[in-house]
Amino acid sequence: MEGWGRENKAYYHDDTTKYQSKPCQPGGGTMNKPPSRRAKSIPKDSTPPKPALKPAKDTQQQDNPASATIEVAAVEVPELTEQEQRDRLHLERKVERAFYEGGKALMELRDRRLYRSTHRTFEEYCKDRFGFERRHPYRLMEAAGVVDNLIKMCPIWTQNESESNAATVESAQTQILPTSEGQVRPLTKLEASQQQEVWRQAVEQVGGKVPSGRVVKDIVDKIRERTPIPNPYRKGEICVLVPKDNPDLRGKGGYWGVVTHVGEYSCTLQTWDGDYTVKIEHLKSLELLDEDCLFMEQLCMRLRQLNAVASRDPSVDWLLQGLGKQAKPYLSSLQAKLLAAVEKEYKIEWKQKR
């Protein structure tokens, strides 16, 4: 048995480790048989993974997207021809002067009463035809007047565009004029000389570009702190009360009336229920024509006479308050009949002034 054991011992030598096999049992079996490893079963339905359509060329570049190289094709942009440069300048001027041209056109429509065939008032015409709210067309007209004044300071802009040459174009570009109504709005309550000075300062402040309305307003506010602004209202003008923070005007917002006195910083407004002396910031002009102002003045007197009736029916107050807030230079057919019927009821005679 000793010889058999020695003959069946196997030795394996390595440079670092020595491995020794265990003796075999008689009959050729091993004493400790290692467990067999079973191959994992693969389902018949399973398919091997598909190879990538386009193998990555550079895995390091994919791991670091910041190092990716983007190829951009260069596109040559042709220079503008002389004709294209003239066309561009011509179109830019149209955009810049759009609000100005609109204001000038509205002035002519109003002054010539070209709306009279379809509308009774200029305000209704502007709302139906252009979608303008009551105040917007007057803002455009006021802005056009300011631009007319500023053009005097920039005479090169008054040249005919068809006669302009390259030198004129280059010099015209150094002249800066407003491009929107909002830039001009803060200037409308200033005198002509003040308008020009404010605009010059605003252009210089923004480095020779078109200033925003905010920049213009800031300069106007500084001037107002140093210089009193003249009263912009006149006697006989129709205005609306704007209460703001004035407690004496609480509940009177929207009442219209006739300016009967113009002071240095205030006005007296005559409405259907009394007289109010207020600062100019508590008034807003309706910008009516003289004949429309005369109609409103006469209507105000009729309402005041009716308001003076002490024993009137409470329903009359509804009519007075409604007409006292309707800031329009006309009455509807029904309103005219109601007012005439109430005046007849209380024996109030009214003769329209010519």
Image (cartoon, helix red, strand yellow):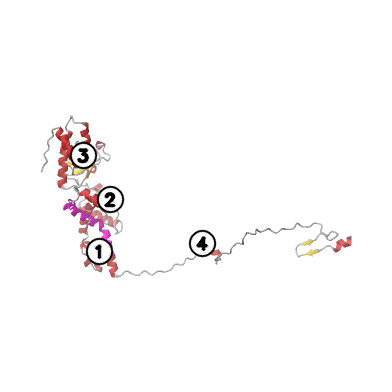
Q: Which mark is residue 217?
A: 2
**Residue at the disc numbered 3:** 323
Instruction: Name the residue type under label 3.
Output: Leu
Give the mark nearest the N terminus, 3 or 1: 1
Please state the extent of the stretch shown in magenta in the rendering.
88-116
Helix, strand or loop status at disc 3: helix
Q: Given this view, does label 3 or label 1 mark the residue nearer the observer? A: 3
**Residue at the disc numbered 1:** 172
Give the mark nearest the N terminus, 1 or 2: 1
- Residue 236 percent across, percent down from the top left: 15, 43
Q: CA distance from mark 2 to mark 3?
A: 36 Å
Instruction: Name the residue type under label 1.
Output: Ala
**Residue at the disc numbered 4:** 65
- Residue 314 in sight from this viewpoint: yes
Q: CA distance from mark 4 to mark 2?
A: 50 Å
Few, some or many C-alpha atoms within 10 Å of disc 2 (few <14, some 14-19, many ≥20)? some
Helix, strand or loop status at disc 2: helix
- The answer to whether mark 4 and mark 2 are in CB contact below 8 A is no
Q: Is residue 89 magenta?
A: yes
Helix, strand or loop status at disc 4: helix
**On the rendered image, what quadrant is the N terminus found in?**
bottom right
Q: CA distance from mark 4 to mark 3?
A: 73 Å
**On the rendered image, what quadrant is the C terminus found in?**
top left
Q: Residue at x 50, y 62 (%)?
A: 66
- Residue 261 in sight from this viewpoint: no
Q: Is residue 256 magenta?
A: no
In this rendered view, identify the residue nearer to me: 42 or 295. 42
